[in-house]
Image (cartoon, rainbow, N blue to C red):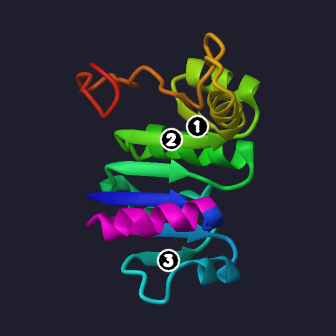
């Protein structure tokens, strides 16, 4: 399985390692060469220095052949733009954008983009630690309804039904 990750921070690097060790073909993109020092020296994937919101960089990374795409930079706008490109332009079937702002996470999900909001995720985890039930409608992962292109039928994807 081919997975592309934009952002080689602590989350991106750690997730890239996890996926690669699980047998995924992993490509990780970051604008900073130094960011790749977070990867283990024997990282079996591919690291590409470039802007994950640039179509040419995504094309070079083989996004069109990816089954999974994760936008995991520190910028909400950067993540949503990269994720939208992966979903709309390259038609990657499984796309997730990390978003810090819960309001944006819900808005982007309503527009058809699956998001992971670490703010609401942390609130939920802290509440569970205290023995509290999560707030209604809370939760860190907001999975969008699968996007259907005019020329293809809806397909079931992990965590979602067609």
Write the residue at 57% across / 34% down: 115
Residue range (magenta): 11-26
Q: Residue at x 76, y 33 (%)?
A: 101
Considering every residue shown, the one lying at the far bottom of the view is 41
Judging by the rendered image, the residue that carries numbered circle 3 is 47
Kindly state the secondary structure of the residue where label 2 is placed: strand
- The quadrant of the rendering that contains the C terminus is top left
Q: Residue furthest front?
A: 131
Q: Earlier in the sequence, mark 2 or mark 1?
A: 2
Return the disc, 3 or 2, that comes first in the chain's sequence. Answer: 3
Q: Name the residue under label 1.
A: 116
Residue 123 percent coordinates (x, y):
71, 31
Pointer 1 local density, CA inside 10 Å: few below 14, some 14–19, many at least 20: many
Residue 155 among magenta residues: no
Residue 69 in the image, given as x and y percentages of width and height: 44, 50
Q: Residue furthest top?
A: 136
Residue for badge 2:
96
Do tag 2 and tag 1 residues touch (Cβ < 8 Å)? yes
Residue 64 image position (x, y, % from top left): 36, 54
Residue 47 seen from this side: yes
State how far apart marks 3 and 1 are (Cα): 23 Å
């Amino acid at each position: 399985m081919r997975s592309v990750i934009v952002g080689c921070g602590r989350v991106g690097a750690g997730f890239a390692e996890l996926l690669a060790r699980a047998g995924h073909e992993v490509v990780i993109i970051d604008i900073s060469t130094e960011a790749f020092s977070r990867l283990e020296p024997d990282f079996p994937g591919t690291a590409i220095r470039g802007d994950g919101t640039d179509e040419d960089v995504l094309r070079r990374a083989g996004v069109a052949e990816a089954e999974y795409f994760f936008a995991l930079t520190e910028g909400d706008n950067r993540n949503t733009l990269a994720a939208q490109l992966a979903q709309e332009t390259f038609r990657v079937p499984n796309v997730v954008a990390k978003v810090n702002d819960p309001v944006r996470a819900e808005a982007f999900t309503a527009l058809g983009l699956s998001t992971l909001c670490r703010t609401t995720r942390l609130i939920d985890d802290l509440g569970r630690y205290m023995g509290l039930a999560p707030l209604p409608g809370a939760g860190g992962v907001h999975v969008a309804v699968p996007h259907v292109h005019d020329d293809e039928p809806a397909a079931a994807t992990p965590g979602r039904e067609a």
